[in-house]
Image (cartoon, rainbow, N blue to C red):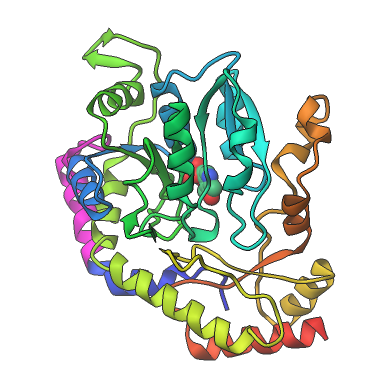
Amino acid sequence: MKFVDLGRQYEILQKDIQSRINAVLDHGRFIMGDEVMELEGVLAKFCDAKHCIAVSSGTDALQVALMALGVSHGDEVILPAFSFFATAEVVLLLGATPVFVDIDPVTYNMDMTQVEAKITDKTRAIIPVDLYGQSADYTALNDIASRHNIPVIGDSAQSYGATFDGKKVGSMATITATSFFPSKPLGCYGDGGACFTNDDELAEKMRQIRVHGQHNRYEHVRLGLNARFDTIQAAVLLSKMKVFPDEIKSRQKAAVYYDKILGDFIKVPSIDPRGKSVFAQYTVEVDNRDAVQEVMRAAGVPTAVHYPASLNKQPLFKDKSFYNEDYPMSDRAASRVMSLPMHPYLTHDDQDKVAAALKDAIS
Ligand SMILES: *Cc1c(COP(=O)(O)O)cnc(C)c1O
């Protein structure tokens, strides 16, 4: 059994993907070719955003977003203490300071009741993370952010396709950043990402930042990056978008089945009833995680940990003042969470095997 099985999806899409890739090989515009613009249109429409700017990775999408908002030295950016490293990394790369907020132990997303106390006159952005594919509470956060006139950047690397309060991820933040890393719910065959916004001026800035701050060719109006998107990856995603809505439904069905067969012996994910998760991960909590993972591995069931430490506790931060801060809910999650195999082509048979192995491992 695989943790994420991309092979089954490729079997279904093989002909279409190959002919689209061949078309790119024929026309030869390998970077920012026509398929990239076509994809941007499809992605923006799908999530009710006015603009989509496809970029080279989810990490670059976050950095492009921060740069477009002018975040730099001396600024503070608020983000949850529990996420993938990139969420904090991009803030530090720009010389700004991450200000951490603990998570809500039920959803694992940023605890919005703790955000306002962290806002100072240096706060230049807030980055909620939609962990495991579940949208953060943008309704609560946007209320706080708009009162303080602070832009929100959604780290939606795991949640493209999710909804909250009837709105789509991609339409709720000032800028939404997502990732097309192969194992994300919408993944390409390499690195990729995208920024979404409804703001024309920010969209223009992000398009410039993506290509070295260029306005016209060789006319640079700001500092930027090389964050362009590959045409072959756009071709792959155009094909995958055809099945993506069905794949989301399949992930949600797999989650419902896991809930049913695991719910009486383990803590299963809680999804806020106002939202719909795309289940980038299906994550449970266990005691003695190392031992549980070992027993499951021996039974042929792969598991993974997202993530084993709070963001502020990474070794490179040992001299930073925030290293010694405590985020009890984040620390607790980091020591207990374990993700189970999850993808749209998981069978009930596979899920029964996961459940049996898990039950055995925790008893
Ligand atoms: C995957 C991920 C990223 C980074 O995306 P890449 O495409 O790998 O650069 C950022 N934040 C979160 C929460 C992620 O899961």
Seen at 37% across and 69% down, the residue is 248
* Residue 59, image x, y percentages: 49, 37
Give whichever of 7, 111 is nearer the camera: 111
Examine the residues drawn in magenta and state their main secondary structure.
helix
Q: Is residue 57 left or right of residue 268?
A: left
Residue sitting at the far front: 147
* Residue 245, image x, y percentages: 29, 67
Can residue 306 be seen here? The reply is: yes
State yes or no: residue 32 in magenta: yes
State yes or no: residue 197 in magenta: no
194 in relation to 275, above or below: above
Q: Is residue 124 left or right of residue 316?
A: left
Can residue 84 be seen here? The reply is: no
- Residue 284: image quadrant is bottom right
| Quadrant (top left, top right, bottom left, bottom right) of the C terminus | bottom right
- Residue 315: image quadrant is top right
Seen at 57% across and 73% down, the residue is 341
168 in relation to 345, above or below: above
Q: Is residue 277 left or right of residue 237?
A: right
Seen at 78% across and 50% down, the residue is 328
Q: Which residues are magenta?
A: 16-35
| Quadrant (top left, top right, bottom left, bottom right) of the N terminus | bottom right
265 in relation to 292, above or below: below
Seen at 82% across and 67% down, the residue is 290
Give whichever of 313, 139 is nearer the camera: 139
* Residue 65, image x, y percentages: 41, 30
* Residue 131, image x, y percentages: 55, 55
